[in-house]
Amino acid sequence: MNGACLKPLLVLIFAAFAADANAQSVHRSKQHQFTITEVARGLRNPWSLAFLPNGDMLISERAGRLRIVRGGQLDPAPIAGVPKVKAGGQGGLLDVIVDPDFAENQRIYLSYSGGTGSGAGTEVVRARLDDGTLSDAQLLFTAEPKTRGGRHFGSRLVIDRDGYLYISLGDRGDHMDEAQNPKNHLGSIIRLNRDGSVPDDNPFTGSGDAKPEIWSYGHRNVQGMAIHPSSGAIWAHEHGPRGGDEVNIIRRGANYGWPAITYGIDYSGAIISDKTEAPGMEQPVVYWVPSIAPSGMAFYDGDRFPEWRGDLFVGALRGQHLRRLEMDGENVVDQELLLADLGERIRDVRSGPDGFLYVLTDSPRGRLLRLEPQ
């Protein structure tokens, strides 16, 4: 074969190798085969993902930047007008959600760690998003008391079908006993009207023995909340210490036990409590020993993965996987680990309006990934 014939043949061979290298590998689960598309990369410790009605996506970065993905491309310029955050440890700019009436009011909600001096705590603002800028920011909630340290801010947000805003909080790490004291906000889930006022039917409104904003208490560090697609109930998961991560159904005025009852032990190996249950304290739907360090949670309600419809998906930081919980009503009947081969911390998971499943990976060069049926 002469050189003139060899050259186009080599081009075809190299093109074939390049196409094969760029091909998406097929991932197999018990019920679906899927591929992974990288939507965005180079995100600095992304924490939360939210979808706008026009198909754009908002991504919060813990260092204090709010990013937008337009037309499938990450805008290099962050959104202006984000409130100042107290970034450090687990704190920073955390959750972002979109108002159900965004098409009319352009409002979004942000949770973050805020404070002055050595104290910090979870705060929530509502603002208008218009042409890449936030305006008309209103502080809706600030956790009390502000405490030292950079752990356990909670900070997931959801708006339920009745329009109430729920805010998850943590015990702030060094104050775990205060999670049993509803006279402060530590270790609780908050329920507000969307303007920040307290609903009249909150369980502790007018009692004087608890903060009226509190909906439930006895939580350690809630970093995942989702609305059940059938019942409309709020589900949440929380970090345990060494073992004892929990998924719970959040009920009005309920006590979830931390630290009086737990399935975990302290990081030192010390016993936190010798009890795993007690009268008047809720039991989890499921718990994990050892810990997977859950973060982010979503019920899948799309059409592209029909066998996954109604399943609960949980991101795992320490476990470095996406966990699928197959549900039968309120019962977990099977569990499956997905994306473990990526070797990445999964910070958030969302069921997209397009029927695909989206995840954020947590690192200084984090990624937004989309799971698509093969």
Image (cartoon, grey):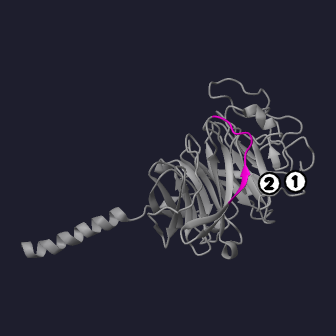
| Residues drawn in magenta | 138-148
Residue 226 placement (x, y as % from top left): 71, 57
Name the disc covering residue 191, or none.
2
Q: Residue at x 85, y 49 (%)?
A: 212
Q: Amino acid at mark 1?
A: Asn
Q: Nearer the viewer, residue 353 or 116?
A: 116
State which quadrant residue 225 falls in.
bottom right
Q: Secondary structure at mark 1?
A: loop
- Magenta span contains residue 140: yes
- Regarding residue 92, the answer to whether it shows in the image is yes
Q: Amino acid at mark 2?
A: Arg
- Regarding residue 154, the answer to whether it shows in the image is no
State which quadrant residue 217 falls in.
top right
Q: Nearer the viewer, residue 32 or 177?
A: 177
Dot 1, crowdedness within 10 Å: few (<14), some or many (≥20)?
Answer: some
Name the disc covering residue 98, or none.
none
Residue 335 placement (x, y as % from top left): 65, 50
